[in-house]
Image (cartoon, rainbow, N blue to C red):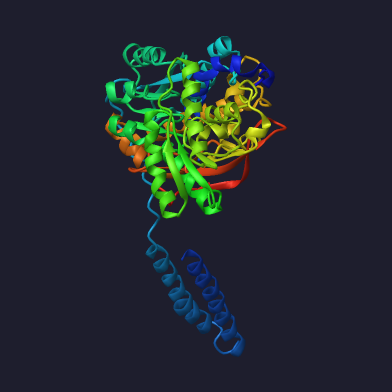
């Protein structure tokens, strides 16, 4: 992102509150040889006998010996050879694969087509309204290229995919509801790939009863309300927090500290409830659990509520905040009250390498006291070296007439990778669902995938108990020279954690 520097200060920063929430929520995968040998040795032996007998008595029995030998030895050999050959059973021909019967099984699924919807955050509107470039690139062209390539290769069991892309502004729920209605009722798609925030994806799963494959956002409550139809590429929100906290405990990050567990919106209480037993079992000194409540449209009041909670934690003797919610809001708060405290993040927002710290006026002094252990998101260099990403980019570049993507822009790379990954997962599930595609067969197919790789995501997995593909966490630290978090060390598996 190209954003103004931190000198804009907090007067301007207040208009960013909802954008912070948006970005937080956005964060919020791979015998015949023996027979031939016997025949080769038997025939020379017979020939040797035929030449040896005439050599012993050439004058007395020149006619008899040759007559006997061909009658007995060669006859026996020639009789044995054909008998051995037919004994071998010819290899059975490989049966042709059973054709998949394609039926018009559900809304958005006909004998010849599958309709897929894409609900994509509109980076142009965000840039126009907030002056922030979160990575502008032609999302519609990307999906057009991917679907065209897939159809040229036979589609999904012979069905073509038709993709409908609709963009929305992720502020509040009104625009998200518009997109849901357009995709489900006007376009009549079967499955939606999306970037809906908060509970807005439930319009697809709970209200309309169709599967949803999000870039992020799955949690326990949403899954229950979705009747098992909510899937995501990024690691489940609760698993991020549990996996990150588990690794912090293992690495000794929390040892010797007086820890305050912090979360914001009421749904985030699920994360606090999940990590508290881990902290207790590890003997971590937890001072308390703190929350300012859900943010409102009153940014001044939001900041005041957060500052009040920060002041309370400081007064209670907290010296490390285990943050389960928005990364930047709590940092801004401790900076406003001048509190020098260490902050450990578990939100995937820290892995996005956003430099929004500039526009929030967050100083290096405060940022440097923070770190994160959260979902693994490869760097641009790592992502661009991934074969799945390279294939996706090649498909786009081959079919796009626009200017090439700016792959030096981390936000664009991150955005492209996320869309490529979500499309790949959706196709993988649809292929596994076979010819009779319904929400039930889609869910069963997804839950039976096991472990696989996706673009820039190794070791992805889905199962009956795991509907988000990501399985790895990673450590991130703040680097002042680039004003953002960067990964440190290798990814860490969370498979033992559920």
Q: Nearer the viewer, residue 100 or 224?
A: 224
Q: Nearer the viewer, residue 52 or 233?
A: 233
How far across and down, in percent of the image, does residue 308 sit? 48, 28
Residue displayed at 45% across by 79% down: 72
Q: Nearer the viewer, residue 26 or 19?
A: 19
Residue farthest to the front, as pictured: 315
Q: Is residue 1 above or below residue 471?
A: above
Q: Nearer the viewer, residue 9 or 431?
A: 9
Residue 288 falls in which quadrant of the image? top left
Residue farthest to the right, as pictured: 481
Asked whether residue 5 is in view, the answer is no
Q: In the rendered view, does 161 fall on the left or right side of 391?
A: left
Residue displayed at 36% across by 14% down: 177
How far across and down, in percent of the image, does residue 428 sit? 42, 35
Which quadrant is the N terminus positioned in? top right
How far across and down, in percent of the image, does residue 316 sit? 48, 40
Residue displayed at 51% across by 27% down: 307
Q: In the rendered view, does 358 fall on the left or right side of 36?
A: right
Q: In the rendered view, does 236 fall on the left or right side of 373?
A: left
How far across and down, in percent of the image, does residue 17 sit? 51, 19
Asked whether residue 168 is in view, the answer is yes
Residue displayed at 37% across by 31% down: 267
Q: Is residue 269 above or below residue 57?
A: above
């Amino acid at each position: 992102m190209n954003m103004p520097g931190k000198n804009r200060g907090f007067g301007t920063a207040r208009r960013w509150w909802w954008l912070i929430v948006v970005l937080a929520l956005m964060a919020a995968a791979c015998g015949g040889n023996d027979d031939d040998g016997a025949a080769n040795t038997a025939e020379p032996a017979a020939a040797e006998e035929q030449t040896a007998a005439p050599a012993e008595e050439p004058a007395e029995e020149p006619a008899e010996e040759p007559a006997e030998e061909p009658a007995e030895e060669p006859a026996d050999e020639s009789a044995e050879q054909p008998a051995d050959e037919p004994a071998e059973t010819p290899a059975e021909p490989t049966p042709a694969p059973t054709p998949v019967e394609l039926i018009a099984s559900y809304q958005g699924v006909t004998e010849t087509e599958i309709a897929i919807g894409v609900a994509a955050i509109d980076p142009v509107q965000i840039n126009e309204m907030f002056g922030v470039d979160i990575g502008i690139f032609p999302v519609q062209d990307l999906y057009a290229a991917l679907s065209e390539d897939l159809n040229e290769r036979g589609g999904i069991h012979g069905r073509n995919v038709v993709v409908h892309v609709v963009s929305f502004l992720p502020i509040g729920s009104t625009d998200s509801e518009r997109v849901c209605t357009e995709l489900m009722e006007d376009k009549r798609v079967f499955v939606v790939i999306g970037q809906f925030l908060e509970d807005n994806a439930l319009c697809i799963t709970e209200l309309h009863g169709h599967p949803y494959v999000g870039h992020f956002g799955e949690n326990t409550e949403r899954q229950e309300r979705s009747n098992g139809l909510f899937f995501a590429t990024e690691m489940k929100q609760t698993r991020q927090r549990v996996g990150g906290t588990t690794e912090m405990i293992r690495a000794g990050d929390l040892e010797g500290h007086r820890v305050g567990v912090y979360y914001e919106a009421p749904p985030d209480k699920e994360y606090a409830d999940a990590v508290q037993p881990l902290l207790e079992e590890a003997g971590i000194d937890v001072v308390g659990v703190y929350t300012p409540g859900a943010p409102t449209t009153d940014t001044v009041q939001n900041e005041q509520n957060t500052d009040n909670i920060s002041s309370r934690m400081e007064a209670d003797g907290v010296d490390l905040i285990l943050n389960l919610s928005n990364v930047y809001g709590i940092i801004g708060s401790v900076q406003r009250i001048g509190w020098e405290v260490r902050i450990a993040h578990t939100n995937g927002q820290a892995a996005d390498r956003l430099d929004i710290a500039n526009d929030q006026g967050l100083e290096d002094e405060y940022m440097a006291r923070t770190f994160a252990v959260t979902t693994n998101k490869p760097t641009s260099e790592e992502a661009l070296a991934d074969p799945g990403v390279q294939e996706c980019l090649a498909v786009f570049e081959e079919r796009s007439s626009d200017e090439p993507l700016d792959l030096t822009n981390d936000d664009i790379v991150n955005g492209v990778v996320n869309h490529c990954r979500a499309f790949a997962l959706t196709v993988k599930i649809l292929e596994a669902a076979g010819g009779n595609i319904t929400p039930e067969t889609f869910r069963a197919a997804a839950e039976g995938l096991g472990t696989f790789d996706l673009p820039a995501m190794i070791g992805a997995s889905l199962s009956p108990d795991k509907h988000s593909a990501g399985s790895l966490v990673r450590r991130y630290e703040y680097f002042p020279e680039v004003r953002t978090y960067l990964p440190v060390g290798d990814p860490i598996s969370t498979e033992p954690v559920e």
